[in-house]
Amino acid sequence: KGHMYALDAKTGKIVWQFFLVPKTEGDIVRGPLGTTPLDNSTWKNVPGAPISGGGAWTSTTLDPASGLLYVPVGNPAPDYDNSVRQGNNLFTGSIVVLDARTGAYKNHFQLVPRDWHDWDVSNPPILIKTRGGKRLMAVSPKDGHLYGFDLADNKLLYRTPVTRIENVEEPFAVDKDVHFCPGAGGGEEWNSPGYDPLTNLIFTGDADWCTTVKLQTTQEVTASAPGQFWTGERTFNPADVFGQFARSDGYWGGWLHAVDADTGVWKWRLKSNYPIMGAVTPTAGGLVFFGDMGGNFYAIDAATGQKLWGKKIGGAIGGGVITYTANGAQKIAVATGYVSPAFPVEIRRAKISILGVEGD
């Protein structure tokens, strides 16, 4: 069950705690609770299926000017069987906005209601001022879309597809396999979109990777012991957490989209042979740097999408990409060597690669 905590930086004492899904009898309270309107009304669970999920498994976004904390919330549980948890399952699949000092609820944006595809809101939103003067919150979860919200009235401006979207409305079943895209490992993962104020473009790096799921029976789902993997998937294997047939079609790839921040219309896009799960980093020099899970790293013209440079620099790139100045010269630092049993990547030693030119 997901929680958000604020800790005193000097002592480690819990300043406040916020339940990201409804608090129920027996839940442990470790600190003062932030005020919340959340109740059980969006969770119509069957007996034996407790309210759970909603983990905050990635970073948050703090707006220092307003004192607001934007918290991305993961999927409900069990992941794939929403028949045992009817309703929209708040606050899963959402951005929850809290008062950073008190933990009090201020607002929420649910992007993936009643999720049954394991489409976490998997990265923190970016807060930007667009060329058109909008105060925008942009976020791209695992459902394969880029969302833009106008923070003046909190209304959704656009929902733009940024990877392959297929067969996402078909219900899952106990007697057949259902193949859908993006899968549980698709869409945008743990790195946020990037924004270039010079071009007014938002850049999203995504995985084009599908999953196939067959469900357990309701009796099997509700008989699961506490502390066990609880996805509702009949074919679950801990070494293949995204489904037995996630790789059965022999394909995975990636997309890089450049989307107008005011309109949500994409200006250009690039296809990669590997998922793009690392950071996408624009620079003031008109370049966009990104890598893929094949260990390839690229420099792209931000305005046109033209590839200017590319090279395999190591293992899978799934982490940060930063730019900085040292000795009067610009450098790019890239985390490589990402390894996980969930991703079929080349096993390489983890390292940080530094690229750039010699300084003074």
Image: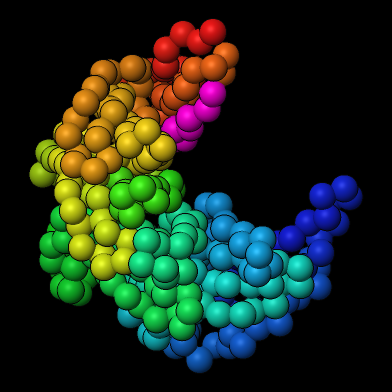
**Residue displayed at 58% across by 72% down:** 97
Does 272 sit left or right of 130 as displayed? left
Q: Residue furthest right?
A: 11
Above or below, comparing residue 109 to residue 16 in the picture: below
Q: Residue furthest left?
A: 249
Q: Main secondary structure of the magenta part?
A: strand
Model colouring: rainbow
Q: Decide which of 166, 145 is in the foreground and name it.
A: 145
Pick the quarter of the image with the C terminus.
top right
| Residue range of the region highlighted in magenta in the rendering | 318-325
- Residue 355 position, x and y percent, is 41, 17
Q: Decide which of 177, 278 is in the foreground and name it.
A: 278
Does 40 sit left or right of 154 as displayed? right
Above or below, comparing residue 167 to residue 207 in the picture: below
Taking the magenta stretch, the answer to whether it contains residue 323 is yes
Above or below, comparing residue 61 to residue 22 in the picture: above
Pick the quarter of the image with the N terminus.
bottom right
- Residue 226 position, x and y percent, is 55, 63
- Residue 203 position, x and y percent, is 32, 49
**Residue displayed at 65% across by 69% down:** 66
